[in-house]
Structures are given as C-alpha cells and as structure tokens.
Amino acid sequence: MKSTRRGFMMGCSAAIASLAGSRIHTVAFGDTGPEGPYPKGAFNDETLVVVFLRGGMDGLNVVAPIDGVDRGHYEAARPDLQLPVSGTGAALPLDAQFGLHPAAAPLHDLWQNNSLAIVHAAGMNESTRSHFDAMEYIELGTPGVKSTTTGWLTRHLDSANNLPPEIVMPSLAVGDLQQTSQLGNLETINLVDPDQFHFQNGPWRWRDAQRTALRRMLQGGNSPLHQTARQALDAVDIVELYTGDNYMPANGAVYPETSFGEDLQVVAQMIKLDLGLRVVTVDLGGWDTHESQGNGSGGYFAGLLGELAQGLAALYLDLDGSGSANYAQRLTVVAQSEFGRRFTQNADDGTDHGHGNVMMVLGGNVNGGFHGAWPGLAPGQLFEGVDLAVTTDYRQVLSEILIRRLGNNQLGTVFPGYGGYSPLGVVQGNDIPPDYSGGREEIFSDGFETGDPGRWIVGGG
C-alpha cells in the first residue's frame, strides 16, 4: 500500500509537509540560493559517491602499459593475461604509454571529455595483503589502526562547517549494510529499493494514524534517538511520495541489469530528489581473481570491469543536465579498491594479492588525465620485488576532494595522523590551508599515542 499525498501530509513534519504542494528542492534543506535565509554560497552542495571495489581489483589490467620499457616487463610477467596492443581486444590508448582495458570502453568517452581522472600507483603504505585489514584501514581512514570507532566519511560530516543544520538525507549507504567509512554515523540511511522504503507496520488502514502518533511521541525530544527517528520518518515520507517503478534515467542512460546497476540508479534517483544528499557509498565485489581471471582482454575480469564501466558512465550521463538541473556539476565519484594484484600472473591464470593500484575519479569538476607518479615495473622498482609500488597515498586524493569539492579542510579530524598534504590537481576548486589539529584530544576524548608520533588510536566518536 503506497503512501498517498493525504497520508504524507498527515504523517510528516510541518516543515516537510509545507513542501508537498511543490517539487522538493535543495533550497528547502539549507542549500545555496539568493532567496533563502542564508547567503548564497554559505553551504556546500557537492555530492560525493564512494564506490568500493571489494576483493582487490587488478589495476594493472585496467590501465596497462602499451609502449616503452615497461611494456616489455608487463608482457614477460603476464604472458597470458596481458592486454594486446593491436587486433581484436586491443587496449584503448589513453596516451602514448598507457591503454585502457577495452571492456572499460564506456569510461573512455569520459576520459576524452576530461571528466575522468586516473591516479597512478595509489594505495596505502601498510603492506598488509589481508582483504579485511586493508578494507578496514582504508574505510576508517587510519591505516595501521583498526581500533578507530568512526569512519572517515562520518568524521567528514561531523567536522564540516559548511552544511545546513538540518538535512533530510545527508548520508546514504546503498545496500543492506552500512559501510565502514560511515561507521558511527546515525544519520546514514540504508536503502536497497526505493519502492520498499516506506512505513509499514501493521494493517495498512492504520498506518497514517500510526505515523502521526509516532511523530507526536518524538516531538520535542532532542536526544540522538529522537533526532534520528524524526529524520528517518522525513526521509520515508518524501521517498514514498516522489519515487516509484516508473523512474526513467535521463539522456538515454542505460544501467547494467545487475545489482550494481540498480544500486547506481538508486543513487541517481536519490540525488534528483534533492534531499540534501552529501555522501553515498556503493559496493561492487568479486575482484579477488586468483584464478581464471581471463586471458588477454576477455573472460571473467572483462565482464566485471564492463559492469563497473557501464554503471559509472550511466550514472554520469543520467545526472548530466543543464542549468540548475545539472547534477553532474556537483557530483564527484571516486572508485578504489583495498589493494592491487601481484604483477606476475600465477599458475592458475590469475593474480594474487598485491599492493599499489589505480584510483578513478569522475565528475563535472574533475581535471581529466593521469595524476600521481608512475613508479615503473622494472624488478628494482617493484614493491618488495613483486608488486606495483605505492607513490600516492589514497588519503592525498580524498583530501583534495574534501578540500576542493566539499570545502572541508579538517584533515586532522578526517584523517588523523596524516600530514604533508598537497593537491595533485585531480579536481577543481579552491585550496583551503589544511587544518591538522583535531583527531587527538580536541576531537576524540580517548585518543592516545601509540609510540609512533604520526599514528593515533582514534576513539570517542
């Protein structure tokens, strides 16, 4: 039983109900606008979508050397898995030295219009090859420390001083679980299918009355429970009213008919609802290719990479509008994995756990092209003699997005223990001097030094 407009008006808060007669818009939730109570530019309205590629994506076969001395090293290390440079399934040239896996062709168009940036040899300096440890370190934002009690996205939202005081849906986790990067955030909404995101408790004929009664029970309470419950009800009311089975992606965008494609369509749909959405997390797993990865540019890996590329390209196209409806102009998508794969293929036509990897960033304000330093693939240039080295700390990329796109320079809070940030030029925006205070006693009540002056255990929320 879907919510009716009458049910929406009865159930939701007065502030939200007042908007029911017209389309919800961002100004309603404290966004920028000359007619609102806040000066234009007072609030940041960027949406950051973090796509985590779980399992350790083989970045060396996403972006592979196609010429030069490293091409020889690459061919020797991967006689079966190497991307060809000519003929059927040849890599798509990105520049004179590197080519893109042909299964990622939808991203090649974004590369050509400078909306896709690729960061070479990115990752963390922790040498773990454990999936679980690496994912936890990256999502907590504290490599080497797993006792951190909040995720880096949570600390971003908590420390940002350019967000409106109330947002209906500031944080969204698409899927059944809240990702570790949002750990500790009580405002994150988990959503799989908007059509199933509605108030449902008991017989349908009593739901409007139950919704109204629940709001009256929560009215006036200021505890985190009261605030979170009211926010959840607001989100349910609006999502019920403005979503349905008839969502049509814009500009002819076609999402892959997979769970990942459906997740990205949900992201676009929620962004277009203008609920103040600021951060989103989405997962795509299956990258642990120890065997039967796929020779040349075919096989299992190509299928999964094609799903990723088609989905990201569809999301960008769906949100790429004109004027005030051009959501792509305030969208930044970053895709990363916990680590890369071993440089040399194994005996099972796969690759084992590695180290350095690629990060991909796309959006309307991205400086397309390659960024970061390429370390080389000669034996003396490999990490521990077997893996692509890390030359760009993943936090450097995320910090640039925080500062230039999200307007948050509180790096000491978001990434405690990280210092020496300098922009790579991945995205456009204003450079604000980073603030490395916080992340210690100023922010986390029970933080204490571990003996390493650059490492702090973070706790206290």
Image: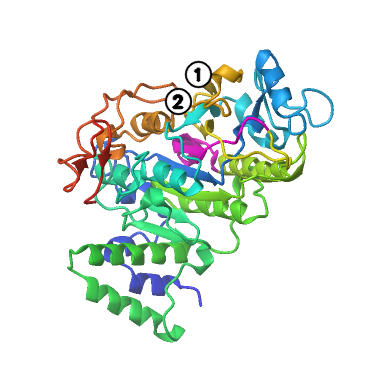
User: What secondary structure is found at the residue carrying circle 2?
Assistant: strand
User: Label 2, on which residue?
Assistant: 392
Magenta span contains residue 321: yes
Bounds of the magenta segment = 319-344
Nearest the eye: 142 or 272: 142
Magenta span contains residue 220: no
- The answer to which image quadrant residue 111 occupies is top right
Q: Is residue 19 left or right of residue 134?
A: left
Q: Are marks 2 and 1 in contact (CB under 8 Å)?
A: yes
- The residue under the point 37% across, 51% down is 182
Label ID, residue 160: none
Up the image or down, 458 lies above or below 241; here it is above
Which class describes the residues within 10 Å of circle 1: few (<14), some (14-19), or many (20+)? Answer: some
Up the image or down, 170 lies above or below 228; here it is above
Residue 13 drawn at (x, y percent): 29, 66
Which class describes the residues within 10 Å of circle 2: few (<14), some (14-19), or many (20+)? Answer: many
- The amino acid pointed to by label 2 is Thr
Residue 115 drawn at (x, y percent): 55, 29
Residue 43 visible, this orientation: no
- The residue under the point 28% across, 31% down is 409
User: Label 1, on which residue?
Assistant: 373
Up the image or down, 69 lies above or below 297; here it is above
